[in-house]
Image (spheres, rainbow, N blue to C red):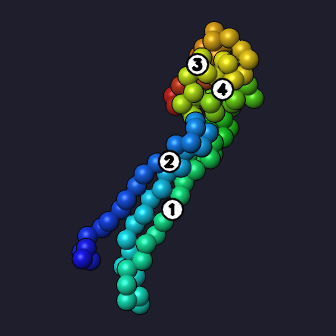
Amino acid sequence: MFSDKLILLSDEIVVDKSNVFRIKVRLLHIDGFEVPCLLVTIENQYESLKSLAITEVKKFDLTPREAEIWFLYRNNYSYKEIATKLYITINTVKKHMKNIHTKRQAYLVA
Protein backbone atom coordinates (compact mmCIF):
# COMPACT_ATOMS: atom_id res chain seq x y z
CA MET A 1 0.00 0.00 0.00
CA PHE A 2 2.84 2.46 0.91
CA SER A 3 5.72 0.66 -0.77
CA ASP A 4 7.27 3.82 -2.23
CA LYS A 5 6.94 5.97 0.89
CA LEU A 6 9.11 6.37 3.98
CA ILE A 7 6.88 5.81 6.97
CA LEU A 8 8.06 6.86 10.42
CA LEU A 9 5.85 7.11 13.47
CA SER A 10 7.14 8.72 16.65
CA ASP A 11 5.72 9.45 20.07
CA GLU A 12 6.82 10.11 23.64
CA ILE A 13 5.67 8.46 26.82
CA VAL A 14 6.18 10.70 29.85
CA VAL A 15 5.97 8.97 33.21
CA ASP A 16 7.76 11.77 35.09
CA LYS A 17 10.82 14.00 34.52
CA SER A 18 13.17 11.06 34.98
CA ASN A 19 11.18 8.64 32.84
CA VAL A 20 10.57 9.93 29.34
CA PHE A 21 10.67 7.44 26.50
CA ARG A 22 10.70 8.23 22.78
CA ILE A 23 9.30 5.45 20.63
CA LYS A 24 9.87 5.36 16.87
CA VAL A 25 8.43 2.86 14.42
CA ARG A 26 9.69 2.69 10.85
CA LEU A 27 8.46 0.57 7.97
CA LEU A 28 11.40 -1.13 6.24
CA HIS A 29 11.55 -2.96 2.95
CA ILE A 30 14.43 -5.42 3.21
CA ASP A 31 15.76 -7.36 0.26
CA GLY A 32 15.03 -11.04 0.65
CA PHE A 33 11.86 -10.52 2.70
CA GLU A 34 8.50 -10.83 1.00
CA VAL A 35 6.72 -8.56 3.44
CA PRO A 36 7.87 -5.25 4.94
CA CYS A 37 9.29 -5.22 8.48
CA LEU A 38 8.81 -2.80 11.34
CA LEU A 39 11.83 -1.37 13.11
CA VAL A 40 10.86 -0.28 16.62
CA THR A 41 13.27 1.80 18.70
CA ILE A 42 12.74 2.91 22.27
CA GLU A 43 15.01 5.64 23.59
CA ASN A 44 15.20 6.51 27.26
CA GLN A 45 15.49 10.30 27.03
CA TYR A 46 16.75 10.53 30.61
CA GLU A 47 19.69 8.22 29.86
CA SER A 48 20.45 9.98 26.58
CA LEU A 49 20.57 13.35 28.30
CA LYS A 50 22.61 11.83 31.12
CA SER A 51 25.24 10.64 28.64
CA LEU A 52 25.32 14.04 26.98
CA ALA A 53 25.59 15.80 30.34
CA ILE A 54 28.48 13.54 31.41
CA THR A 55 30.33 14.45 28.22
CA GLU A 56 29.70 18.15 28.86
CA VAL A 57 30.84 17.86 32.49
CA LYS A 58 34.20 16.55 31.31
CA LYS A 59 34.45 18.99 28.42
CA PHE A 60 33.72 22.06 30.57
CA ASP A 61 35.67 20.75 33.61
CA LEU A 62 32.75 21.16 36.03
CA THR A 63 33.01 20.46 39.75
CA PRO A 64 30.97 17.55 41.18
CA ARG A 65 28.32 19.97 42.50
CA GLU A 66 28.18 21.86 39.21
CA ALA A 67 27.80 18.50 37.48
CA GLU A 68 24.78 17.62 39.65
CA ILE A 69 23.17 20.96 38.90
CA TRP A 70 23.97 20.79 35.18
CA PHE A 71 22.51 17.30 34.92
CA LEU A 72 19.23 18.41 36.50
CA TYR A 73 19.16 21.57 34.39
CA ARG A 74 19.68 19.53 31.20
CA ASN A 75 16.72 17.39 32.30
CA ASN A 76 14.47 20.47 32.34
CA TYR A 77 14.36 21.00 36.08
CA SER A 78 13.69 24.60 37.04
CA TYR A 79 16.07 26.44 39.36
CA LYS A 80 13.49 26.06 42.13
CA GLU A 81 13.19 22.31 41.52
CA ILE A 82 16.99 21.95 41.48
CA ALA A 83 17.25 23.85 44.76
CA THR A 84 14.57 21.69 46.38
CA LYS A 85 16.07 18.43 45.12
CA LEU A 86 19.60 19.32 46.28
CA TYR A 87 18.56 21.08 49.51
CA ILE A 88 20.18 24.37 48.54
CA THR A 89 18.85 27.88 47.93
CA ILE A 90 17.81 29.20 44.55
CA ASN A 91 20.59 31.78 44.83
CA THR A 92 23.11 28.97 45.20
CA VAL A 93 21.71 27.32 42.07
CA LYS A 94 21.98 30.65 40.22
CA LYS A 95 25.59 31.08 41.34
CA HIS A 96 26.52 27.57 40.17
CA MET A 97 24.73 28.12 36.85
CA LYS A 98 26.60 31.39 36.36
CA ASN A 99 29.90 29.53 36.93
CA ILE A 100 28.82 26.75 34.56
CA HIS A 101 27.93 29.22 31.81
CA THR A 102 31.25 31.01 32.31
CA LYS A 103 33.12 27.70 31.88
CA ARG A 104 31.04 26.81 28.83
CA GLN A 105 31.73 30.20 27.26
CA ALA A 106 35.46 29.89 27.98
CA TYR A 107 35.49 26.48 26.29
CA LEU A 108 33.63 27.78 23.24
CA VAL A 109 35.98 30.75 22.85
CA ALA A 110 39.16 28.67 23.24
Q: In what element is the residue under mark 2?
A: strand
Q: Does residue 49 appear in the picture of this structure?
A: no
Q: How many angstroms separate mark 4 from mark 1 (CA)? A: 30 Å
Residue 107, image x and y in percent?
57, 30
Which residue is drawn at the image coordinates 69% and 30% (left, top)?
67
Q: Residue 7 or 57: which is nearer the viewer?
A: 7
Residue bearing mark 3: 79
Is 28 on the left-hand or right-hand side of 109?
left
Q: In what element is the residue under mark 1?
A: strand
Looking at the rendered structure, the kind of residue marked 4 is: Ile
Residue 85, image x and y in percent?
69, 23
Residue bearing mark 1: 41
Looking at the rendered structure, the kind of residue marked 2 is: Ile
Mark 4 surroundings: few (<14), some (14-19) or many (≥20) residues within 10 A: many
Which residue is drawn at the image coordinates 63% and 42% (left, top)?
50
Residue bearing mark 2: 13
Which residue is drawn at the image coordinates 42% and 77% (left, top)?
37
